[in-house]
Image: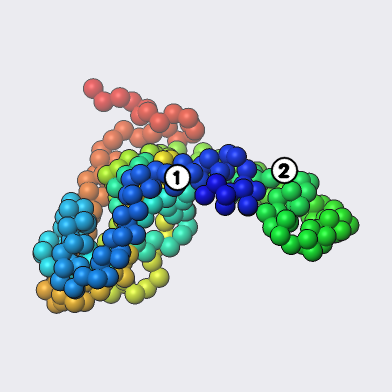
Amino acid sequence: LSRYMRWRCVPDHLFLNIRQHLTLIWEANEDLDDYELQVKEQLSPVLRVQLSYHIYGRILRQLPFLQWMDCHSCLMELANKIESTFLNTGDFVFRLGMPNDEAIVLIKGSVYCSRTEKMTAPALELEGSPLVARSSSQAHDPSIKQQMTGSKGPQKLYQKASRSLQNHDFLTARAVKTIQNVWRQRRKKEVPKFTSRVMTAPSYFGEACLMTPYAEWTAPPPLHLFTAQCETICEYVCIPRSLVKEVVDRFSPWLLYRFEIFLKSLHEQKIAISKADSSEEVESTPFLSDDTNMLTPLLSKP
């Protein structure tokens, strides 16, 4: 690893981050995750399913949104199709607006969830830094070095175009903030929802893609309403909706019938909660209509 980093001219801070990430994974698994794949390839189908269920069955049984799939055979089939994934600090599990086509179960680590992800981020390198210094292949391909150092004219044009783009991003961000501030001020009577939250293992998110009618599972999935970014090194299990659909199709019609009953009950509970909330709003004292900062009732109940 050290020889490779020196060959690629990796800076010290990046080298330390990479080494720390790989060391934690190696110490946690001792390369047994790769060996696990080799073992599964050599096992018979029955033994492979039993081993997968031993690894992931406990996790699947504890998920509230899979309580309709409480059959031992169904969970074994699903466990044989999923696998765990590692992400480092700063990696995105998913981002705002991305298709939500899988449920994610966080096994280890913590994830920062936010509805207000910044659209732009500062560049890793300062503008105007020579590209030759960043090139890791300059010692192996002199022709590339000559091309980069011999194009000073176009490089200035690129820098000016980059500044113009940065100015455009700044003006766009300022306009967006202005619109958001005006929009927030008009939402006087609504209770503010969360803007950020830290989720620690064990936890799950993205299950909304499964809580839709089965006939809609082949349609484009809904979009994520927030961004999830790793605060620490995380291990999580992905449960794609397509894999759940394969299990439902295999054990239909009775498993599909159980899912429809579960989904219908869930929908009825949401309607009941919505009606209860609306009745409480009618009975509550009216709010001030011209106060942008005051969220307390005009008169307090005795």
Which residue is at a point 41% across and 40% down the rendered structure image? 232
Type of the residue with mark 2: Leu
- Which image quarter: residue 240? bottom left
- Crowding at dot 1, Cα within 10 Å, few <14 / some 14-19 / many 20+, comes out as some
Which residue is at a point 17% across and 57% down the rendered structure image? 54
Residue 63 visible somewhere in the drawing:
no
Asked if the residue under mark 1 is in contact with the one under mark 2, i.e. CB atoms within 8 Å, the reply is: no
Which residue is at a point 26% across and 50% down the rendered structure image? 274
Which residue was labeled with disc 1? 21
Could you tell me how far apart the alpha carbons at marks 2 and 1 are, in whole angstroms? 26 Å
Type of the residue with mark 1: His
Nearest to N terminus: mark 2 or mark 1: 1
With respect to residue 71, does 276 lie above or below?
above
Residue 161 in the figure: left or right of residue 271: right
Which residue was labeled with disc 2? 126
- Residue 214 at what x, y percent from top left? 26, 71
Residue 7 in the figure: left or right of residue 231: right
With respect to residue 212, does 136 lie above or below?
above
Disc marking residue 238: none
- Residue 189 at what x, y percent from top left? 40, 39
Quarter of the figure with the C terminus: top left
